[in-house]
Amino acid sequence: MTSESVIREPLVTGGKTVHDVTQDICSRVEQKPAKSWLLAMAVSLATLGVGTIAVAALLWEGIGMWGLNKTVGWAWDITNFVWWVGIGHAGTLISAILLLFRQRWRMSINRAAEAMTIFAVICAAMFPVLHMGRPWLGFYWALPLPNTFGSLWVNFNSPLLWDVFAISTYFSVSLVFWYIGLIPDFATIRDRATNKISAAIYGALSFGWDGAAKTWSRYETVALILAGLATPLVLSVHTIVSFDFATSVIPGWHTTIFPPYFVAGAIFSGFAMVLTLLLITRKVYKLEDYITIQHIELMNIVIIITGSIVGVAYITELFIAWYSGVEAEQYAFFNRALGPYWWAYASMMTCNVISPQLFWFKKIRTNLAATFVLSIVVNIGMWFERFVIIVTSLHRDFLPSSWAMFYPKWADVGVYVFTFGLFFTLFFAFAKFFPVINMAEVKSIIKSTGERK
Amino acid sequence: MSDTKNFLVGVYEDEDVLLDAIKTVRSGGVKIHEVYSPFPVHGIDDALGYKGSRLTIVAFLFGLLGTSLALTMQLGMMTVDWPMIIGGKDYAPFPSFIPVTFELTVLLASFGMVGTFMVISNLKPWGKAKLLDIRITDDKHIVAVDLGSNTINESAISKLLTDSGASEVNKKTL
């Protein structure tokens, strides 16, 4: 076995040659869809269909279809928004930050992770768009366009407007980064195409790529600079999302710890979602030689680190609430942990702080079934985190006479279901029609880190 | 038929053999038209004598444009065109402008650089690749020598390519 150093395990196992990489990845695109894929796609489309009913009802009737009330004016909508945006942090983190750190293990997971990022951001964007009630007028509310609907311009003091810029920039830059990486791989599929339709489609998608050394040299520069730009960008997005809360004066929201705490939580949930999806993709597409146990273990280590940062943040919040001596702040946290929503707080603590600590055991973090279950547990916990922050801080208002509870209605659930349908429909379409592994990058490390027969 | 060129194409299996071959062929006095690979090969720029890309400067300039546009837009709307006191803040609340300024800087730098890369590398949706060997998007590297721009005769170039490790040498017209 030759690998780059004695202590490093090979990143691609099974003695793959460069041609094998092309064959293994392209054949998934070229073959007729498998029965398991058709079934998965049918379920996703059905989910999307059911969700569409809720979205249609919401647009027809207005957002009174949601269970919001005068006291709890933000609930599932923004919880789901922050949850999906958080999930959308892993892809660009993997491809940008790990590129800058020269972590070669990113190469077999970055394509799928970036795709997941883009789809998660689309799902996230559904909530701010739908909560406008009349999204067709949203251009004037959210974009700096001259209008005659009251105040002349959008308010650049508002964190909600910063969000519009942050999310749309993040989406656009991630999409471009992903697409630049896809071009050489589309060219590979184009040159193998056996029928006219796929030759035409992948030909157009590959932009006339010819693999010239000069183009590759520029491509590498572009990838490096994009990584350099995307790194502060990915950190800025959840920072700005946390400003939605941190710049307010609501006890429980008005804390300076939010930006780093939200970013760590986002990476935490994003890696968990990448694991959930990749464990399935790896199994169905038999990619065990590309996505090895080592890849899964490394992702689990990122989960322990970020999960522990989140845990420290929860405890710091409690400590600072007590130490500040501010009564309103103290009550907000007391109510959060022991008030009527104690069950949400307990779920969050268990799923996010306790369960990832199991990954300290090598046996657990290298076990596929355990990883799969824990990756879902983490995302349940992260949903509860946002629910706890948002709803428990709001439901006991400044005046006890306006204290209330939040009860979701069917449209709350329905719109959330809609985003699941959308996410999985897009992901399964990607998994069938796009190369799920970055072939060009994996080929470049086959010689130095591939396992020899 | 003035735009067709005759090429001698050396096919290589391995990236390290390719790098040595480029050096051998160039030191033999042969001008290489271009090298085509299925993946980026490290050190190929130096071997071919390519200078580093200036796309970094392009990205910086577009970033600067983004910063200026964002600040001009926000100051123009909030301070000049319709000044309003919001939340007791200044007419020119600079700290509030930082997030949008940062995002537009990144957006313009990325799109400007990628757009420039597309244009100078001739990548476009309707673009047709002219490949000297279709296997270069799979697992082969090729060194293309334009016979028209070299004074050395064809058989000598062919021998140089074979001796440097090419598994096959083909003649192609494009």
Image: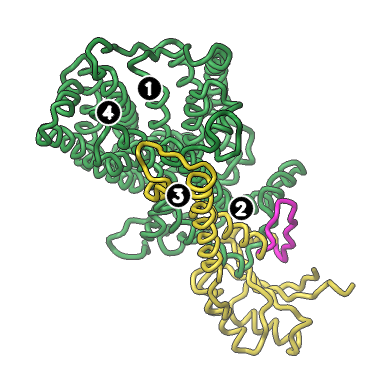
Chain colours: A green, B yellow
- Label 3 and label 1: CA atoms lie apart by 39 Å
For image coordinates 24% across by 41% down, the residue present is: A257
Determine whether label 4 and label 2 are within 8 Å by CB: no
Report the front residue among A74 and B118.
Answer: A74
- Label 1 and label 2: CA atoms lie apart by 41 Å
* Amino acid beneath label 1: Trp
- Label 4 and label 3: CA atoms lie apart by 44 Å
Mark with earlier residue (1, 2) = 1
Report which residue position mark 1 lands on: A74
For image coordinates 46% across by 51% down, the residue present is: B101
- Label 2 and label 3: CA atoms lie apart by 16 Å
The chain to which mark 2 is attached is A
Looking at the rendered image, the disc whose residue lies closer to the viewer, 2 or 3, is 2
For image coordinates 26% across by 12% down, the residue present is: A403
* Amino acid beneath label 2: Ile
* Amino acid beneath label 4: Ile
Report which residue position mark 2 lands on: A183
For image coordinates 16% across by 19% down, the residue present is: A338
Query: In which quadrant is the N terminus of chain B drawn?
Result: bottom right
Indicate yes or no whether the magenta region holds residue B126: yes
Q: Are marks 3 and 1 on the same chain?
A: yes
Looking at the rendered image, the disc whose residue lies closer to the viewer, 4 or 1, is 4
Indicate yes or no whether the magenta region holds residue B42: no
Report which residue position mark 4 lands on: A250
Report which residue position mark 3 lands on: A108
* Amino acid beneath label 3: Ser
